[in-house]
Image: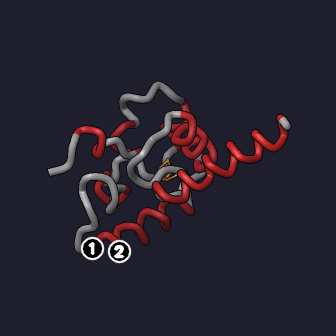
Amino acid sequence: MPGEASRRYASALFDLLDRPWTAEAACRGMDPAIFYTGGGDRGTQPGDKKKRRVAHQVCDSCSVCAECLDYAIAAREVFGIWGNLSERQRRQMRRNRYLAQSNHEH
Ligand code: SF4
């Protein structure tokens, strides 16, 4: 049974987020489960690969992908696909940004 934190994925949060870009989100109204696959306390489930493929296709067509990703990085959203990136890809991006910032400061 997933914990509360595991249910923080993009399309399920839009009604709670007071941000104009969510109105343009391609995933609005879609089943949030499509954007939440594997990882965290849920573990990998059958069908995750297919769901992930569908999620990336939806994100590919989304006009607010950059805004979504910026939000997810800033809010440190751990679970689900946001801005067309998986949890792992966002972690990597945060790490790269941190390293780039550290190098810039020294
Ligand atoms: S980038 Fe993907 S997760 Fe983010 S708003 Fe668009 S469709 Fe939804």
The answer to whether mark 1 and mark 2 are in CB contact below 8 A is yes
Residue 83 drawn above or below residue 72:
below
Q: Residue at x 20, y 49 (%)?
A: 2
Q: Is residue 6 left or right of residue 84?
A: left
Q: Secondary structure beneath disc 1?
A: loop
Q: Is residue 63 above or below residue 8?
A: below
Label 2 is placed on what type of residue?
A: Lys
| Image location (x, y in percent) of residue 68 | 55, 43
- The image shows residue 53 at horizontal and vertical percentages of 43, 71
Circle 2 SS class: helix
Measure the alpha-carbon separation of dots 1 and 2: 5 Å
Taking the spot 52% from the left edge, 29% from the top edge, the residue there is 19
Number of residues whose C-alpha sits closer than 10 Å to that of mark 2, classed few (under 14), some (14–19) or many (20 or more): few
Q: What amino acid is at disc 1?
A: Gly
Q: Residues within 10 Å of mark 1 (few under 14, many from 20)?
A: few
Q: In the visual, does 52 lie left or right of 60? A: left
Quarter occupied by residue 55: bottom left
Q: Tell me the residue that label 2 is attached to.
A: 50
Query: Which residue is most to the left?
Result: 1
